[in-house]
Image (cartoon, grey):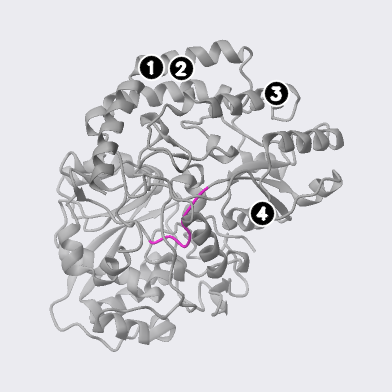
Amino acid sequence: MKKRISLVLLAAMLATTFAGCNSDSSDTGSSTPASTASETSASDGGSEAADSGESTGGWEGETTHIVMTYLHAGVVPTDTDKVFDAVNAITVPEIGVEVEPLPLGIGETGQKYSLWISGGEQIDLMMVPFTNLTTYSSQGLILPLDDLLAENAPYISEVMEEYPLRDGSYYQGEAYGVTPLMYYYGGGGSFLIDEDKFNETGLTYNEGDIWSLDQMTEMFAALKELYPDAYPNGTITAGATASTSGYWGLTTDPLGATPSSGVLMGTESTTVENLYATEEYYNYITYVKEWYDAGYIYPDAATTSSTQRELMLAETLLGYPMGNQPVMKSDAEATYSKGFIQIMLNESYYASQSASGGSFWTVPISSASPEAAIRFLDYTFSNHDIHNMILWGIEGEHFVVLDEENLLIGFPDGIDGTTSPYYNTFGLYGDRRYEYIWDVANNKAVNEEYTADAMSRPTKAVGYAYDTTRTSAQIANVDAVVTQYVPTLESGSESDLDTTYQEFLSALEAAGLNDIIADNQAQFDEWLAQQ
């Protein structure tokens, strides 16, 4: 069975920026701690109402038509209109909202959104993925949400007392976005290695152990001896625009932004630093250089047009670094149809929510009805059948429930992820703790355990997000320097590491990184004083 490629994987390179709190103890996908009469009736309707398109109804006012962006991977699923007709059969009588999807490829959002809003096109709910929201809030293109949420979103208002649904969306003291409630929070680094090939080395890994880079070197050497034509460290840096060092045991917090504006090193620090100038970073790239010279890393890692997935399928690569969340292992096993060992490289921890790493629901200024938009958004959180319908389609047609207790689903007979008329795997909706899953290894209990563990190690910046308004031009210059140097430095393919590394640090300074860090530190100190 082809496994979903979730939003979590799209955000994997920034996984360590997710923040959160432990989830509640409910075990079913259709029950919810509803806080209004309409939420209760929606939950009581359950899957049967969702499947039939029927609803007992609870709304007595007029129906409002809203337009919601519907992101996809490049192809609009055939049954999109059919699914949203089923959604509207429930939402119109329940909350008085009829939603129209506005399909858009996820890679086109940066090109289209500003143009649409400036042109006055009606968009009532807009999903902004992996983009700093100040791009929109500072230009007045989206509305502040605090009052709208307080008046129209009882479920979201309740859960965001525990979960950082607005972190990373603040501009001048007001929130402009709401993230989906993730099914796990926290981050850290791990290495996923083909289980059969690892066992051939004679080495032993005990679940939960934290391996050093010296231990990783020992494993790479053993694998290279067994498979001289393959590369045990599947690091691919071609096209990289940010550091992947977080996968390799560096515990950092980018303070709700990116390393291009400074980081905290470790969970106890309150000092904003240049990640690339730290001893930890230099130690990391020194190991990478040794691995490259020893033949453990693909020679064209910094320049190849081949993807990591293609090279893994060809067994040119034997493993790769990734976040340490449980879903990473289960997704790898589904993607490559083989077992993997997930070697932990640091403990999970809980960091600030990144504006650039998160995905936010926003309300553009071109919205015809912001109140109805937020009412619908809240309903996608409180009614888990609606959330799962928008994500996976109609039960019985696009998926079947295999294990309700563990929220496990599969495909109906005769279809799979390549043939289904509705298979759009971006997890952008609602309270994802109640999201149906395709692999029981990624179940709610496992993710709750991971979240609780990560929550026990918070950084000092949880709840803070650096406002980059004053330094956005300098950050763009720093980003350009990072894009120039990181692919070779972090693949080990730089012939003269020390010389190039010093050039890199000088270029970062010339681009203004020290000034950015000073501005970030001043904001952070002010925020800390208010806590």
Q: Which stretch is magenta?
A: 181-187
**Helix, strand or loop at disc 1?**
helix
Residue type of the residue flagged with mark 4: Gly
Query: Are there few (<14), some (14-19), or many (20+) residues within 10 Å of tag 3?
Result: some
In percent of width and height, residue 322 lies at: 59, 44
**Disc 2 target residue:** 505
For residue 129, side relative to residue 420 (left or right): left
**Helix, strand or loop at disc 2?**
helix
Res 461 → quadrant:
top left
Residue type of the residue flagged with mark 3: Glu
**Disc 3 target residue:** 290
Disc 1, disc 2: CB below 8 Å? yes
**Disc 1 target residue:** 509
* Sequence-earlier tag: 3 or 2: 3
In percent of width and height, residue 327 lies at: 57, 57
Query: Are there few (<14), some (14-19), or many (20+) residues within 10 Å of tag 2?
Result: some
Distance between mark 3 and mark 2 Cα atoms: 21 Å
Q: Main secondary structure of the magenta part?
A: loop
**Disc 4 target residue:** 208
Of residue 509 and residue 372, the one placed in the foreground of this image is 509
Of residue 173 and residue 142, the one placed in the foreground of this image is 173
Distance between mark 1 and mark 3 Cα atoms: 27 Å
Residue ID at (48%, 45%): 16
Residue ID at (55%, 79%): 405
Choose mark 3 or mark 4, whichever is in front: 4
Judge whether residue 509 is colored magenta.
Answer: no
Q: In this orientation, does residue 303 appear?
A: no
Residue type of the residue flagged with mark 2: Leu
